[in-house]
Amino acid sequence: MHHHCYAWVGEKKTFDRESIRRPVGQAPTATSETEVLDRYREALAAFPTTDVPPIQTAHWLMKAPSQIRETWEEPEEAGAWLGLQLQEFAPRFTSEQDREVTRLVLLVRAAVERLEWGGDVSLGHYLKGRVFHSVALVTCSPNRAAPDLSCPIRQSRT
């Protein structure tokens, strides 16, 4: 088992576009509304390549391997990476409560505990302005939430 780390910073309005955050589902029919067809086309083109976080954390494994920021075997190492991400962006968090050091330390500890039993971690914070910061730690080989998803690194090697 290992853990892939992902991070994204971008406009909140981009994060809110669900069609690029969902994997392609069943194709619409010829009689589907134009809006449904447009959302399907957008998801088909954007989901696999965009670095915008997926709605379901495990779906990061469906994205291109280039989206992976780091990979760690040990939960503590992935937790340390998370801690550095939070430390870097905390001064820009809009919520004063979210910037508290004790809270950030507890978030990292909880993340490590979750990774130890094979869970995923996804955190998001609003930054000053209209910007959103998202980080995710995704357990791979296998993923508990989506055991049928294969490792993106292995996919790239075959």
Image (cartoon, helix red, strand yellow):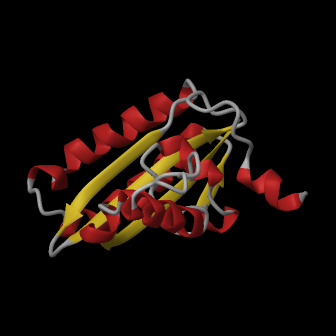
Q: Which residue is at the far top?
A: 117
- Does residue 124 appear anywhere in the picture? yes
Q: 138 or 86, which is in the foreground? A: 138
Residue at the spot 55% in from the left edge and 30% down from the top edge: 145
User: Where does the image place residue 35, in percent across and percent down from the top left?
Assistant: 37, 63
Residue at the spot 38% in from the left edge and 33% down from the top edge: 110
Q: 80 or 40, which is in the foreground? A: 40
Q: Which residue is at the far left?
A: 96
Instruction: Tell me the quarter of the picture where residue 67 sits.
Output: bottom right
Which quadrant would the N terminus be assigned to in this image?
Answer: top right
- Does residue 69 appear anywhere in the picture? no
User: Where does the image place residue 51, in percent across and percent down from the top left?
Assistant: 50, 67
Q: 78 or 15, which is in the foreground? A: 15
94 left or right, relative to 108:
left
Q: Is residue 93 above or below residue 75?
A: below
Q: Which residue is at the far front?
A: 31
Residue at the spot 48% in from the left edge and 52% down from the top edge: 22
User: Where does the image place residue 156, in percent across and percent down from the top left?
Assistant: 81, 61
Q: Is residue 120 above or below residue 8?
A: above
